Every structure is written in C-alpha cells, then in structure tokens.
Amino acid sequence: MTPLAEIIAVRIRATGPITLADYMEICLLHPRYGYYATRDPFGVQGDFTTAPEIHQMFGELCGLALAQAWMDQGSPAPFTLAEIGPGRGTLMADMLRAIRKAPGMGEAVEVALIEASPHLRQIQRDRLGAVAHLDTVEELPEKPLFLMANEFFDALPIRQYQRIPDGWCERMVGLADEGLRLGLGPVVQLPRDGQPGDVVEECPAAPAIVEGIARRIAGHGGAAIFVDYGGWNGYGDTFQALRNHAPEDPLACPGEADLTAHVDFAPLAAAAIRAGAVASRPIHQGDWLLSLGAAQRAERLAAAGDGGAMAALRRLTHPDEMGHLFKAMAIWPKGAPPVPGFDALRLHADHA
Ligand code: SAH
C-alpha cells in the first residue's frame, strides 16, 4: 500500500466509505503525499504532457485571443491576467510574451495565479518571478479579468452515481481485504433517467468556480477561456488514472497517479450564463487554434529554424491527436464582441 492508501484506509475504517470526490481530493492535494503536492508531473519524465508543454505556440495563441478581447473592450487598465491551475507556469509565460505585443497591455497587466499546490507554486515563481498566488477565484480582484484555464477542470473532484433498478446509488471508495474497493452507497434521488448499469458524473465544485469568474467578467469586463478534454452533457464513467503516460486502476496507487475525469461543459456554460455573462459552446481545440492562425504561426517558426513546430502543430490540432478530444470554451460580457474563434451559445431558460 502507498502511504496515502494507509491514510485513506484509516479514515474509511473510522467513518465509513468516502465519495470519489473525497478520494480524488486526498489523492491529488494531500499536503504531504498528494500527487500535485509532491511532484512536477508534466512532460516526458512525468505522467502526462499538456498543450503548453508541447509547444510555445499554444500559449501564444491563447494570449493573442485574450489580447484581442482586451482591445475589443477598450483596453481597460489595470486588468488582471489570471490562470487557474498553472502547472509549470509555461502557459502564463507564453501568454505574457504574446500580450506584451499589444500596445499598452504589458504595462496594464497584473498577474494572478490560482494554484493549490505549494510545490507547483514554487515552480511557477521560479519561472515567472514574483507573482500573486491565490487559493480560490473568490480572491480575484474586482477588476477587468482575463483568465485562462488549461486542463484545470479535469483535475477537480467528481462524484459518480450508478443506476440500479430502484434508483441511483453513489459510487463510494470502501475497504476490502486486499485494499481499497469501489462500492455503492444507499439509493438517492437524481433528476435523471437511466438504465440499470448506467453511470453519471457530477463535478460539484466547477459551477461555483465558473460563476465567480463570470460574475467578475459580467461586472467589470474581461474574458475567460477554458480548454479541457470532455464534451457536452457528458455521460458514463470517465474517471481515470495516468501514471508514466499509461492508464491504470484509479484505486491502485493513491497519490502516485494523476486522477482526472472528462469535463462536462454544459454546467459550466449554464453557470456563466446564470452569472450574467455570455458563454460559447465548446469547440474542438484543433479548430479553435487553426482559426487563430496556428498553421501560419507554425510555418513561420519552422522557416525560422524551429524544427519541432510542424510536428507540434499536428499534435495540437489534428483530429487523431489532441485536436478533437480537447475542447475550448469562452466567456465574455454581454454586449462585447465574442472572444476570437468563438460564437455565443443560446441556452433555453430551463438549462440556464
Ligand atoms: N495548466 C497546466 C497544468 C494542468 S494540471 C498545463 O496545462 O500544463 C492541473 C493544475 O491545477 C495543477 O497546477 C494543479 O496543482 C492545479 N490544481 C488542481 N486542483 C486545484 C484546485 N482545487 N485549486 C487550484 N489549483 C488546482
């Protein structure tokens, strides 16, 4: 057993099975043994590679999209450039380089990073210098807010419910002789239909985070872009563990594998609209980057001697690589032009 498996087992023996959300939170963020608390999981030596770590063009294009939105809204100064879950700080570094090309933007920017892991905070400071670190979006200043999140929402704890003939039961982590095991809690009421065996997921923390962001954008101006893998009205069991770039049983090595779930963008859009902002539908990451000029940017970098640019373009945009699996979604204020590459979504009132 890993040290964290022992800690979780002690807790389950004392107070009973825990939700998947509690399990995920302990595994990812436990201050001593949590996955993000103890390591730098990104890149070839780590467990997974994210878009900003593949090539600088990803962060540059995100920065340019936010810079265009900033200019479209009259270049408000000062403004907050924020990122939630900034990992190594690479995306923020690439965005900052890009936005400094917009006249006046570099002088008006105040960077804020929302990061839970003290270990990653240090890596971000090493990369970006002295930056403001916040614990939650609620600590963001009441100012124009331009915000980016890449592979953040997939790391938020989820709960899962499984359909049995009598209703829905929450899937819980309990104990068996040989270690941690998934089981079912008592029947609960869920406003969803289903067939026995169906699994549905919810991410309880996500809508409140989006509301906090969207309320600032609706009130003070700004824009947010979320990129993640997932879909619209997601369905089924998407809880997964990744270690050394290979999938494994999420209960096998708590604290030593990255745990994620696909992001359901529908409740995120609904939360943004509830908060008074405009939301886009999620579009393919590949289509979005290409609409921003990713191919031209890669060709120019390749012509200037960047030997990896064309392969990176393919990884980021091709439907067989990250291009379709990853989606991008944006939020902006009512009355402002859409964030480049996005169209406003119209939701029926009963979804909003
Ligand atoms: N955006 C980066 C890293 C993605 S990994 C990239 O694309 O490379 C997820 C990031 O979210 C990590 O930095 C992790 O520490 C952070 N994180 C996870 N849960 C969080 C929470 N509840 N609050 C703030 N940050 C969190």
Image (cartoon, rainbow, N blue to C red):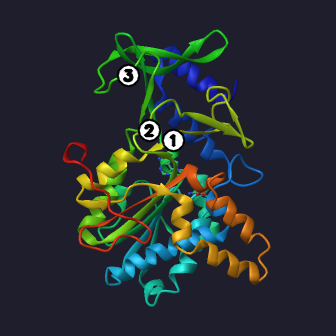
CA gap, disc 2 and disc 1? 8 Å
Contact check, label 1 and label 3, Cβ < 8 Å: no
In the image, residue 198 sits, relative to residue 164, either above or below, namely: below
Q: Which mark is residue 49?
A: none
Residue that badge 1 annotates: 262
Q: Quadrant of residue 73?
A: bottom left
Type of amino acid under label 1: His
CA gap, disc 1 and disc 3? 19 Å
Q: Is residue 123 visible?
A: no
CA gap, disc 2 and disc 3? 14 Å
- The answer as to whether callout 2 falls within 8 Å of ligand 1 is no
Q: Secondary structure at mark 1?
A: loop
Q: Residues within 10 Å of mark 2 (few under 14, many from 20)?
A: some
Q: Position of residue 202 (x, y in %)?
A: 40, 35
**330 with respect to 173 (left or right):** left
Residue at 37 percent across and 38 percent down: it is 204
Q: Which mark is residue 234?
A: 2
Q: Quadrant of residue 98?
A: bottom right
Residue that badge 3 annotates: 194
Q: Position of residue 303 (x, y in %)?
A: 75, 82
Which of the image's four quarters has the N terminus?
Answer: top right
Type of amino acid under label 3: Gly
Residue at 38 percent across and 10 percent down: it is 165
Pick the residue in front: 273 or 23: 273
In the image, residue 231 sits, relative to residue 96, either above or below, namely: above
